[in-house]
């Protein structure tokens, strides 16, 4: 992606309303995706966040410092063209949701799982009419087909930009229910991430932390936090 290595060539960054949303312009020139699509953003809040990232670039464009821009590019170039496939992939997490797989023991760990995860499964049942089944150990748990179908319909109704955020909320946590809970503000990202890490936290308490694993987890947590922010920006009025 050689376009990311270009030097900064603009002075002014602005946001303009256009048909279908908003665009970011650099000295009057519209920003495009890496695939040369017009970068049309769904809300002013998303456009402002993207504009801030472009304005912050100095001598060389550094994509790792532009998470909102990268999420917007993904929404247009990856999620929108295969919306049904992405939706189905995310919905499939309901069949193997992290919250449904519990430890056989010890009691303190199983208690933490129950206290943290049972209220969210209850919420999913009340919100979507989807009661997921819980099992112990690594044996696959067969979920009710109608419950999974109801979750699938909820995901399918989400537009490409917020679905890009939901993708990270679900895949990083391993839980469709946690992802949906953050998207519906049942939980914030901080609490959802903590709940997704109950097993890992337990292992760290027993055996100590691994520095490399801790760094990887911190990177994923930052991405998870960004996904919540991007979702909220996509729904800002």
Image (spheres, grey):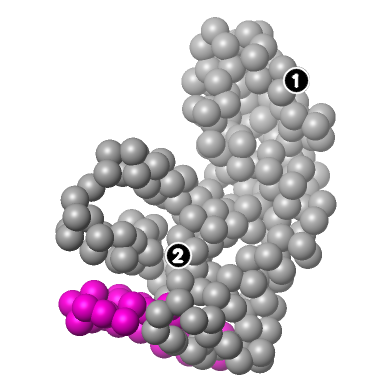
Q: Which mark is residue 29?
A: 1
Q: CA gap, disc 1 to disc 2? A: 36 Å
Q: 59 above or below 218?
A: above
Q: Residue at x 62, y 26 (%)?
A: 14
Earlier-in-chain disc, 1 versus 2: 1
Magenta residues span: 100-129
Position in image of residue 167 (x %, y %): 59, 57
Please state if 187 lies on the left or on the right of 76 as rendered: left
Position in image of residue 194 (x %, y %): 31, 61
Residue 101 occupies quadrant:
bottom left
Position in image of residue 79 (x %, y %): 73, 52
Q: Within 10 Å of the Cα at label 2, are there few (<14), some (14-19), or many (20+) other Cα atoms?
A: many
Can residue 237 be seen here? The reply is no
Near-viewer residue (134 or 118)? 134
Q: Residue at x 50, y 27 (%)?
A: 65
Near-viewer residue (149 or 33)? 149
Q: Residue at x 71, y 23 (%)?
A: 1
Q: Which mark is residue 182?
A: 2
């Amino acid at each position: 992606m050689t376009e990311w290595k270009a030097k900064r060539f603009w002075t002014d960054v602005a946001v303009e309303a256009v048909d279908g949303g908003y665009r970011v312009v650099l000295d009057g020139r519209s920003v495009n995706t890496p695939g040369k699509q017009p970068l049309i953003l769904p809300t002013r809040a998303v456009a402002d966040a993207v504009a801030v990232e472009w304005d912050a670039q100095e001598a060389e464009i550094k994509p790792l410092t532009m998470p909102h821009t990268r999420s917007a590019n993904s929404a247009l170039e990856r999620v929108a063209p295969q919306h049904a496939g992405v939706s189905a992939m995310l919905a499939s997490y309901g069949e193997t949701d992290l919250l449904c797989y519990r430890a056989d023991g010890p009691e303190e760990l199983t208690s933490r799982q129950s206290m943290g995860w049972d209220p969210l499964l209850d919420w999913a049942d009340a919100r979507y009419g989807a009661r997921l089944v819980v099992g112990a150990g690594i044996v696959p748990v067969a979920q009710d087909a109608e419950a999974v179908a109801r979750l699938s319909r909820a995901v399918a109704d989400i537009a490409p930009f917020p679905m890009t955020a939901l993708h990270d909320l679900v895949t990083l946590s391993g839980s469709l229910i946690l992802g949906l809970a953050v998207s519906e503000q049942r939980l914030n990202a901080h609490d959802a991430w903590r709940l997704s890490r109950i097993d890992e936290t337990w292992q760290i308490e027993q055996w100590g932390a691994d520095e490399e694993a801790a760094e990887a987890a911190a990177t994923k947590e930052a991405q998870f936090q960004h996904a919540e922010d991007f979702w909220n920006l996509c729904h800002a009025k």
